Image (cartoon, rainbow, N blue to C red):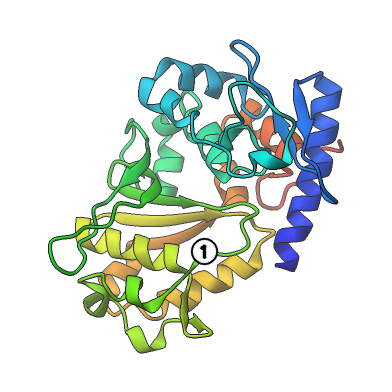
Amino acid sequence: MRYAALLRAELNSRNATYAAALGLSHVESYGETPIVVYRPSGQKHGNFFDASYESILSQPEWKHRLRKVYTQASSLPRRDDGWKELDSSMSSDALLMNVFCCPGVTQNWALALKLGFEVGELPQFGFRAGIPRNGSRSDRTEIDMKLGTLLVESKLTETHFQIQRPALLESYRELDDVFDKERLPRLNGRYVSYQLIRNVLAAHHLGLNFCVLLDARRPDLVESWFAVMKCVKNPDLRTRCKVLTWQELAESLPSDLQVFLDYKYGIVPSGSIGRSM
């Protein structure tokens, strides 16, 4: 949690400076550690790279994603049409869409090779994998993105990959086929890193690849990833699953998008020095 708190503090500082310098419509949440939350203004949104936001507004499925309700809205000033999750400067979903809705990104051969998707694929956000559970049920929870044959989980300041009670996780029909269940990490009897486990199950069930995207400033999440991956039984499935940092991803992105990620998130290509705010 220390790494998450440090990153959250850095992003708070960056976004407060960024919003003020560019005159972007925003508010700060109440409380000891305020969070910058942006107000959309016409065809502009302070939480988004301009070209990405234009693309989002032009795609009905992507635009619908902007309607996700912000669960922390009670900590913000009242707004008639309500605050949305992707308005928050801490939103990993917003970061994901900033990158993959940017024109030309999914046409990039270097990025396609790095992640493992076909050039020109159209991202699907909030993909429901339908992982089978006991009986006739299937899982209805969302995976952040599907890009052709690739499933993606996006992380930024989240403290962990969620903790889940045994009864729910063990209801997945293929859990014992995919994992050495006894070795999966637990805390007080509950399974740790539920989202990773669920997404690996989805990759297995659908025959797809899986990548978790996280920040290089979050070594705790990297450690959680390897704790789960060592429990995967099938070597072929392990090779279809990978972890990549936003910093590694940034190396293959357009230069103007790199500048945006640098100023707003402090994300720069590995080995590079960021610009001063």
Q: Give the image location of residue 203, x and y in percent.
A: 28, 59
Q: Nearer the viewer, residue 88 or 239?
A: 88
In the rendered image, the vertical position of residue 228 relative to residue 44, given as above or below: below
For the N terminus, the image quarter is bottom right
Report whether 57 appears left or right of 223. Answer: left
Question: Which quadrant is home to the C terminus?
Answer: top right
> Residue 242 appears at what percent x and percent y?
43, 61
Crowding at label 1, few (<14), some or many (≥20) Cα neighbours within 10 Å? some
Residue nearest the viewer, comparing 173 with 92? 173
Residue in view at x 63 percent, y 16 percent:
44
**Residue closer to the observer: 219 or 180:** 180
The x, y position of residue 46, in whole percent, is 68, 24
Q: Residue at x 72, y 64 (%)?
A: 3
From the viewer's side, name the closer residue of 195 and 80. 80
Counting from the top left corner in percent of width and height, residue 92 is at: 57, 45
Residue for badge 1: 161
Q: Is residue 141 above or below residue 48?
A: below
Query: Which residue is farthest bottom?
Result: 182
- Find the residue positioned furthest to the left: 136
Residue, x 85% and y 25% (percent of image)? 20
Which residue is farthest top?
A: 42
Amino acid type assigned to the residue bearing label 1 in the image = Phe
In the rendered view, would you say 24 is above or below 42?
A: below
- Judged left or right of residue 237, residue 1 is right
